[in-house]
């Protein structure tokens, strides 16, 4: 059968644009024994994909020029030669940006359709939610009454981090890039939310966290992180999750050096990748599902419709277009 796919046309230097993506028609063979034909339902676009567009060595292999881009996808089985995945099954996995694809069962997880919207398995109950869960609970380990600061707090990871910290009894401060996002964070129960574009960060953080900062969940880096480090308490814990402020930089950014501040406060800084916790993903999904079912977790999605809009939705991540998880609904 004929289907459409999106390939990496060339490697960007600096901010990527539409010219770095190419739409192609491709032919799929019928599924062989053990395989299934999948129809893509939802496509996840995520900041980490920017790193895979470059050839630089990282924790995951780069995309190949001329080959399909891949990422988190929720798909429906429309033809099956795999007894474990009958027609009608809904699965999530790392799949190519194609309207249809053929896959065996490896790397595909069959998901329930009655616990939450199926797109949530790309967000709250998927990689972003698990990133929040393990980064906060394993690295930050906030205690009741402590102050937790989350950068990129209105993103798919950050909004879950803040709500989990509130469940654990912490005081939570989030930073975001618009007044609308700040208002949304307040709706989620954040104690304070700061529009970093309109304030003096040092003054705003001092007012929002008058007792200092015990835990910092860093999704952004840059000037926000510099300001947070100035207010760390003794034995603060920092989960280094992302640095989206630098992903499109063409030169290494120069800023305050943090080592002295970490030394003086005996703070712990730990970078992590959610795949480090792969063996514990069922634990995380179970607990997040329980909290969601109890009404303790809310989640927001920015849904763009149409397979042809996937590159635009991805590029919008770097303009702050999304609140919560950026998702493309394909079918």
Image: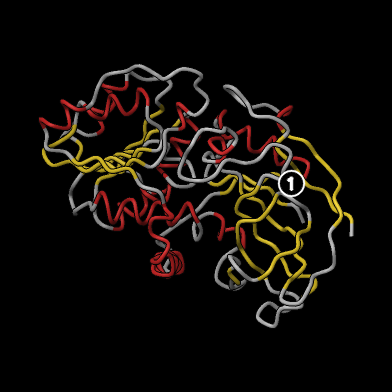
Query: Residue 301 location, x and y as percent?
Result: 58, 48
> Which residue carries the number 1 mark?
305
Residue 138 figure quarter: bottom left
Tell me residue 235's x, y (percent): 13, 42
Q: Quadrant of the N terminus?
A: bottom right
User: Vertical placement of 224 versus 84: above or below?
Assistant: above
User: Foreground: 64 or 221?
Assistant: 64
* Residue 89 on image: x %, y %: 69, 74
Horizontal side of 299 relative to 277 (left or right) equals right
Horizontal side of residue 9 vs 74, given as left or right: right
Question: Which of these two is toward me, 51 or 32?
Answer: 32
Q: Residue at x 37, y 36 (%)?
A: 151
The residue lying at 53 percent from left, 25 percent from top is: 248
Q: Residue at x 31, y 51 (%)?
A: 136
Residue farthest right in this picture: 1
Judge from the rendering whether residue 291 lies leftward or rightward of residue 49; answer left or right. left
Task: Report the label total.
Answer: 1
Point out the image quarter for the C terminus. Answer: bottom right
* Residue at the image position 19 percent from the left and 46 percent from the top: 146
Residue 294 occupies quadrant: bottom left
Above or below residue 132? Residue 196 is above
Q: In the picture shown, does residue 139 fall above or below 217?
A: below
In the image, residue 177 sits, relative to residue 84, either above or below, namely above
Give the SS element for disc 1: strand
Q: Position of residue 135 (x, y in %)?
A: 34, 51
């Amino acid at each position: 059968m004929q289907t459409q796919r999106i390939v990496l046309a060339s490697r960007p230097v600096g901010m990527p644009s539409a010219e770095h993506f190419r739409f192609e028609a491709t032919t799929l063979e019928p599924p062989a024994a053990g395989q299934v034909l999948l129809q893509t339902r939802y496509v996840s676009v995520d900041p980490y994909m920017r790193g895979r567009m470059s050839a630089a060595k990282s924790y995951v292999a780069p995309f190949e020029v001329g080959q399909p881009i891949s990422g988190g996808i929720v798909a429906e089985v429309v033809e099956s030669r795999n007894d474990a995945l009958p027609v009608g099954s809904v699965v999530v996995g790392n799949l190519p940006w194609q309207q249809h694809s053929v896959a065996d069962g490896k790397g595909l997880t069959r998901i329930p359709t009655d616990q939450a919207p199926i797109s949530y398995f790309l967000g709250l109950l998927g990689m972003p939610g698990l990133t929040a869960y393990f980064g906060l609970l394993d690295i930050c380990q906030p205690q009741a009454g402590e102050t937790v600061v989350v950068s990129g707090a209105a993103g798919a990871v950050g909004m879950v981090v803040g709500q989990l910290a509130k469940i654990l009894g912490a005081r939570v401060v989030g930073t975001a890039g618009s007044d609308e996002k700040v208002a949304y964070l307040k709706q989620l129960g954040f104690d304070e939310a700061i529009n970093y574009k309109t304030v003096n960060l040092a003054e705003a953080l001092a007012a929002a966290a008058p007792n200092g900062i015990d835990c910092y969940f860093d999704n952004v880096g840059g000037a926000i992180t510099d300001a947070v480090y100035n207010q760390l308490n003794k034995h603060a814990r920092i989960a280094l999750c992302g640095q989206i402020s630098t992903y499109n930089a063409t030169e290494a950014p120069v800023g305050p050096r943090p080592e002295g501040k970490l030394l003086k406060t005996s703070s712990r800084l730990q970078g992590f990748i959610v795949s480090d916790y792969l063996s514990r993903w069922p634990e995380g999904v179970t607990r997040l599902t329980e909290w969601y079912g109890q009404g303790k977790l809310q989640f927001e999605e920015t849904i763009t419709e149409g397979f042809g809009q996937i590159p635009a939705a991805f590029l919008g991540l770097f303009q702050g277009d999304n609140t919560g998880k950026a998702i493309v609904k394909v079918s």
